[in-house]
Image (cartoon, helix red, strand yellow):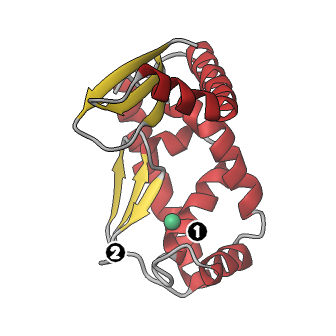
Amino acid sequence: MEYKIKRSNRKTISLELTPEGLLVRAPLQASLEEIEKVIHKHRRWIDSHMQKLEKELEEASSAGMLSQQDLRDLARQAREYLPGRVAFYEPLIGVRAGRITIRTQKSRWGSCSAKGNLNFNCLLMLTPSEVIDSVVVHELCHLKEMNHSRRFYDEVNRVYPEYDKWHRWLRDHGGAIMKRVEW
Ligand SMILES: [Zn+2]
């Protein structure tokens, strides 16, 4: 297996998969033997994640890269569409959201602040509407439960019984969508 080593003043060896391959972060003095041992131990994790990453890159390149104009169009669509979905679910959950912001982000689909402001990724507009609703419900439920506790997920599933199914969709295909943007 090919990999790159980045040595620094750290204490442990960590592995990270990047589109360029396996990146090993290692302490300055770590021997190659130690590094190979860690890689060997996590071989199965590396293989399965590498496969997922390759599939995502394939999916992303067949769908095509998004231009700046595409992203502006998606952001405009999101600003038109998302407030209505938020307004639809607010009374079902019994909360009121603050400001809604649309961003292009490479790692998150939505978030919410302690003040109750919501933030959504414009790339959501490339997913099925059921996925968008699942993210809206997730963030709105955080206005009630600021954590991922059992209580939080009970509320999410009460409001949106198909949550798990669409959350899984996003986990399986979301990475490929985010890879259509040059960050
Ligand atoms: Zn959350």
Whether residue 117 can be seen here: yes
Q: Amino acid at mark 1?
A: Val
Whether residue 128 can be seen here: no
Label 2 sits on residue: 98
The residue that appears at 37% across and 41% down in the rendered structure is 104
Residue 35 image point, x, y percent: 47, 27
Residue 179 image point, x, y percent: 49, 27
Q: Quadrant of the N terminus?
A: top right
Front-lying residue, 76 or 4: 4
* Left or right of residue 78: residue 90: right
Residue 137, by quadrant, is bottom right
Label 2: element kind: loop
**Is the residue 164 above or below the residue 10 in the image?**
below
Lower sequence index among marks 2 and 1 = 2
* Left or right of residue 103: residue 21: right
Residue 94 image point, x, y percent: 54, 88
